[in-house]
Image: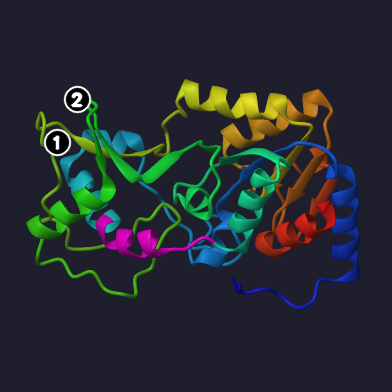
């Protein structure tokens, strides 16, 4: 699959990829991915170069304000068309192939786009949930997002869904004029619906974090791909790997909070670097 890449990697980057491959070769990997792996699929990064400054919806705002729920669901509905149309890129496909070959024990992702699963990865821990599922906060009934999207379109025919919208990493879109938007309710009990994603100010479910830590405990090396490790859950997993004294490789454009823990840090594009690493791992 063609992807947008930078110019030919510099000698320094090639040397770092060789060093990382030497550390990882013959070891079972746990991989943590962040927004940087999905940028080649057209989903922007929260903190990458050029990322706009924004104030995402917090769980407190969502739960406490009907007006904010209108604003969230209207923007999220506009963004869903592009978000759902995104396709896995080379980075996702490389990790799926490493899993099939038994090199990667599984993927832990901070993303909510579902692209790892669509690329063929079977052992994925969606640390922050997934936008393709919706849950009732009262009766806990689950719904497919495509079904909710159909209801939203039927209830809000006045809302245009343009092909070009400014998409945020969580599938949301900034929007005005949302006051008339009809928000979805649970068809079972009439309760409040919320996408099955971890909002800002919300904790990662204990069972999900336990699944992620189990992957790290079983691994013989830890790879971070496309995450700045600003979110606490990611840095906790990195610290767990560091305590095990397994090799740590970080691939990310710009600094991360874990750089000092890394045996090798590669400041380069995630997809092309993962592809280069996979070639060297044999």
For the record, the magenta segment spans 77-88
Residue 40: mark: none
Mark closest to the chain's N terminus, 2 or 1: 2
What separation in Å lies between label 2 and label 1 (alpha carbons)? 9 Å
Structural crowding at the residue carrying mark 2, measured as other residues with C-alpha within 10 Å and reported as few (<14), some (14–19) or many (≥20) = few
Residue at point 50% right, 62% down? Answer: 44
Residue 257 on image: x %, y %: 70, 42
Is 191 in the magenta?
Answer: no
Residue at point 36% right, 59% down? Answer: 84
- Vertical side of 150 occupied by 138: above or below: above
Using the rendered view, name the quadrant where residue 155 is placed.
Answer: bottom left
Residue 34 on image: x %, y %: 58, 48
- Vertical side of 147 occupied by 29: above or below: above
Residue 253 on image: x %, y %: 69, 59
* Residue under pointer 1: 186
Residue 245 on image: x %, y %: 84, 27
- Residues marked 2 and 1 touching at CB (< 8 Å): yes
In-image side of 108 versus 251 (left or right)? left
Give the camera-side residue of 134 and 164.
134
**Residue 159 seen in render:** yes
Structural crowding at the residue carrying mark 1, measured as other residues with C-alpha within 10 Å and reported as few (<14), some (14–19) or many (≥20) = many
Residue at point 65% right, 34% down? Answer: 235
Residue at point 79% right, 59% down? Answer: 279
In-image side of 196 versus 279 (left or right)? left
Using the rendered view, name the quadrant where residue 268 is placed.
Answer: bottom right
Looking at the rendering, in which quadrant would you find the N terminus?
bottom right
Element type at mark 2:
loop
* Residue under pointer 2: 138
């Amino acid at each position: 699959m063609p992807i947008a890449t930078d110019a030919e990697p510099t000698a320094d980057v090639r040397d770092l990829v060789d060093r990382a491959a030497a550390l990882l070769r013959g070891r079972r990997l746990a991989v943590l991915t962040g927004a940087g792996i999905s940028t080649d699929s057209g989903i922007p990064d929260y903190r990458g170069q050029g990322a706009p400054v924004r104030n995402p919806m917090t769980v407190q705002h969502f739960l406490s304000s009907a007006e904010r729920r209108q604003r969230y669901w209207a923007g999220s509905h506009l963004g869903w068309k592009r978000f759902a149309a995104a396709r896995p890129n080379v980075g996702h496909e490389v990790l799926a192939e490493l899993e099939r070959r038994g090199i990667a024990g599984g993927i832990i992702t901070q993303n909510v786009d579902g692209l790892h699963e669509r690329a063929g990865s079977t052992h994925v821990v969606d640390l922050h949930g997934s936008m393709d599922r919706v849950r009732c906060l009262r009766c806990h009934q689950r719904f497919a997002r495509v079904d909710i999207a159909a209801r939203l379109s039927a209830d809000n025919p006045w809302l245009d869904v343009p092909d070009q919208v400014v998409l945020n990493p969580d599938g949301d879109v900034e929007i005005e004029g949302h006051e008339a938007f009809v928000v979805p309710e649970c068809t079972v009990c009439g309760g409040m619906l919320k996408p099955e994603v971890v909002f800002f100010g919300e904790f990662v479910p204990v069972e999900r974090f336990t699944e992620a830590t189990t992957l790290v405990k079983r691994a013989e090396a830890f790879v971070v791909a496309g995450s700045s490790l600003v979110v606490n859950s990611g840095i906790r997993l990195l610290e767990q790997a560091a305590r095990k004294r397994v090799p740590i490789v970080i691939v990310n454009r710009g600094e991360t909070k874990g750089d000092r823990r890394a045996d090798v840090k590669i400041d380069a594009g995630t997809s092309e670097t993962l592809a280069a690493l996979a070639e060297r791992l044999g």
